[in-house]
Image: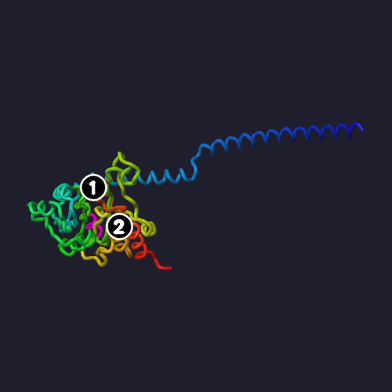
Amino acid sequence: MDGVIADHAKALEGHENWLRDHSSALETTGAWIARLESELSTRPHASQLEALAKRIETLERAHSVSVFMDWINHARLATSPLVSVIMPTHNRAALLPHAIASVQSQTYPHWELVIIDDASSDSTPALLSTVDDPRIRPIRIPHAGNCAARNAGLDAATGEIVAYLDDDNTMHPAWLRSVVWALEQRPDINVLYGAYVVDDTSRLNHTGSGGLPALHLRPYDRQTLLRENLTDMSALAHRANLPGAHFDETLTEMADWDLLLTLTTHHDPLVLPAIACFYTTTAPTRLSNGPTHHTDHQTILHKHLPTP
């Protein structure tokens, strides 16, 4: 009997030891779970990680632009093709001198500026008559809108490369040199777009004014382009006489989106980390987000979205 009791006591002691060990393990596990919960609570959510990744990509693009712009003026060009700059204008005589001067300030000298006066009724004709530069060719057409004016400019252009500048923007001094270098280095590329600097991000986004200037350079993705524009007209350039290099004259705005969609249907463009222009949001009678915005948007979607 004493042996049974002793065995029972020993078993009970073992069971108590097991309970203590199990309790200790539970406490350790509980502490580990609490520590894990604490760590997880301080970690960013998926949306925060996505925002951080986008921020890093933006900073990396800005860095690549900075490096490129420091370097491009030291690059040697093997060729010197004529670059035609197409600039439509209508009743913006106060802005024209700045836009013209920005082309005249290019570090690449072999260019022509075709200015298409879309039947301006202000002092634009008088201003253009005083321009004393053989590289600048003013053309006056009956009023037909900015797309028709650009088409008239394309018809008159004689260059091997075409670039664009809106009359309310100014071209970066190294832009044409950057374009020539890029197309020289990449004979397989026909279309490219670069970065542009917006003067006021708040005004651009219609959230007020007083915002700081910001660099815009979006990566190319066809599916994204089918939903929204990725660049600005003044940041686009392409080789001359490309099939499809024509503007839809039914559009009032978003002609740059339509052109980029057309020219990149079969081949991707080069995204060049160079500043093309300085984009202003203060010009009067701006076309962006005007009364035809929705209609023009739908026109472009119907033209370019794949049919089911």
Q: Dominant secondary structure of the magenta stretch?
A: helix
Q: Amino acid at mark 2?
A: Met
Secondary element type, mark 2: loop
Which of the two marks, 2 or 1, is nearer to us in this view?
Answer: 1
The residue shown at (13%, 52%) is 124
Residue 86 in view, yes or no = yes
Camera-side residue of 257 and 216: 257
Dividing the picture into quadrants, the one containing residue 249 is: bottom left
Q: Which mark is residue 11?
A: none
Residue 185 is a magenta residue: yes
Residue at x 16%, y 62% (from the top left corner): 142
Residue 283 — which label?
1
Residue at 34%, 65% (x, y): give it. Answer: 303
**Residue 162 horizontal/vertical position (percent):** 20, 59
The stretch drawn in magenta includes residue 282 = no
What residue would you read off at disc 2? 254
- Please identify the quarter of the rendering in which residue 265 is found: bottom left
Magenta region = 181-186
Return the x and y of residue 209 as percentages of the image width and height.
31, 41
Quarter holding the N terminus is: top right
Q: Say whether residue 162 is left or right of residue 213.
A: left
